[in-house]
Amino acid sequence: MKRINVISVIILFLAIATESRGQKQTGSNDFITVNVVKDYSPKKELILQDFMDVEYVALETNDDFINQGIVLDIGNEFVLVKNSNRINDGNIFVYDRTGKAIRKINRKGQSGEEYISLYTVTLDEENKEMFVNDILGKKIVVYDLYGNFKRSFKHKNGTDSQFYSDIFNYDRQHLICYDEYDKELPFVLISKQDGSITQEIKIPFKEKKFLSQIRKTGENNGRAVIGVGPGHYYSIFPFNDNWLLSELSSDTVYTFMPDYNLRPFIVRTPSIQSMNPEECLILRLFSDRYYFMESIKNVYDWNAQEGFPSKYFVYDTKELSFSGYTIYNGDFLAKKEIYMSMIKPINHEITSWNSLEAYQLVESYNKGELKGKLKEIASKLDEDSNPVIMLIKHKNRSL
């Protein structure tokens, strides 16, 4: 196993490094500092298409292809979608990039060649494989793009790990993974062949922090517990041909470089280790110009059943300033807001996706509220059609 030797970080990061011995960090001062408790006002009104490219994929609807359009992964050729985790029917719907239905795969079951839960799927078009993250089985099951079983392996084989919550296609031989519950080594590169850890990625922090609230119940002689959280957030982001790594317990978001070094990218203040309750820094979306983030306070009112208040803000790399924001979809004539908390990272080309319900698009079309390609697509839908997937992509720099 490869392991980067520990060295001291640059002077600006000595305080961070002393929390925990970590991976080598480069000496660049090219980072930003964000105060997570500050109220960033006023709000900017932004149009998504002004700083991102947008592509729409209308998912074909037929008797065998009716789904909620939850995107699992997207490549150059294929789009993989499923129904929500609550349904857990095990169906993987395979479309091409134009939205044409190709095949439906279902290998849900109890055998060694099947998955119990379909949490996420990572697409590897180069090797013509897909990696199903079965968190209930604590394993990754590998199939070809027709659903034929190839192999499987456990999460962090031989350790007391919980499961990988984030998995991305790193290169031809490796996946990059994040285990939220690992208190010492949450980020790793693993082999696509057997799941073995080929690269440990050590992020410095003093004490592991979790964005959740837990309490005991009267069940099972008072030993049962229930937990709540603010909804899913992501810790790995592909950006600028590298990877951003965000560990809540650390005061620094790092860029993971091709040589396996860590470069500070964002530094938060005050230190999360000094806060009670904590305010956690969450990453949402990154473009060439704008960095969208969120801070979530780790509090919950059990009686009112509400909590985790959030503040949304953006850093403008041109103006070198923070502000609040509201983002609108420019293909709607009436203002249609896009909520950053509803999107997830995909790959280096497609930074994220959003699902547009067919019945809402039909209603907007009938009201004359759409324009461009989206208007054309909506004219061919009916209320029972599958969702239209909006792909949010980095601007084509060659144009």
Image (cartoon, rainbow, N blue to C red):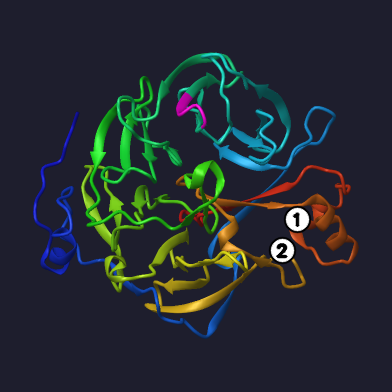
User: What is the x, y in percent for residue 98?
Assistant: 69, 38
| Residue, disc 1 | 374
Residue 88, quarter of the rendered image: top right
User: What is the x, y in percent for residue 280?
Assistant: 40, 65
Nearest to the observer: residue 89 or residue 241: 89
| Residue, disc 2 | 331
- Residue type (three-letter) at the residue carrying disc 1: Leu
Nearest to the observer: residue 108 or residue 216: 216
**In the rendered structure, are the residues bearing label 1 and label 2 in contact, judged by CB atoms less than 8 Å apart?**
yes
Residue 289 falls left or right of residue 386: left
- Residue type (three-letter) at the residue carrying disc 2: Asp
Label 2 Cα neighbours within 10 Å, binned few <14 / some 14-19 / many ≥20: some
Q: CA distance from mark 1 to mark 2?
A: 7 Å
Residue 316, quarter of the rendered image: bottom left
Q: Secondary structure at mark 1?
A: helix
Question: What span is colored magenta in the figure?
Answer: 136-140
- Judged by its main secondary structure, the magenta piece is loop
Q: Secondary structure at mark 2?
A: loop
Comes first in the chain, label 1 or label 2: 2
- Residue 344 forms part of the magenta stretch: no
* Residue 161 in sight in this render: yes
- Residue 139 forms part of the magenta stretch: yes
**Residue 138, placed above or below residue 353:** above
Residue drawn at x 46%, y 51% as measured from the top left: 234
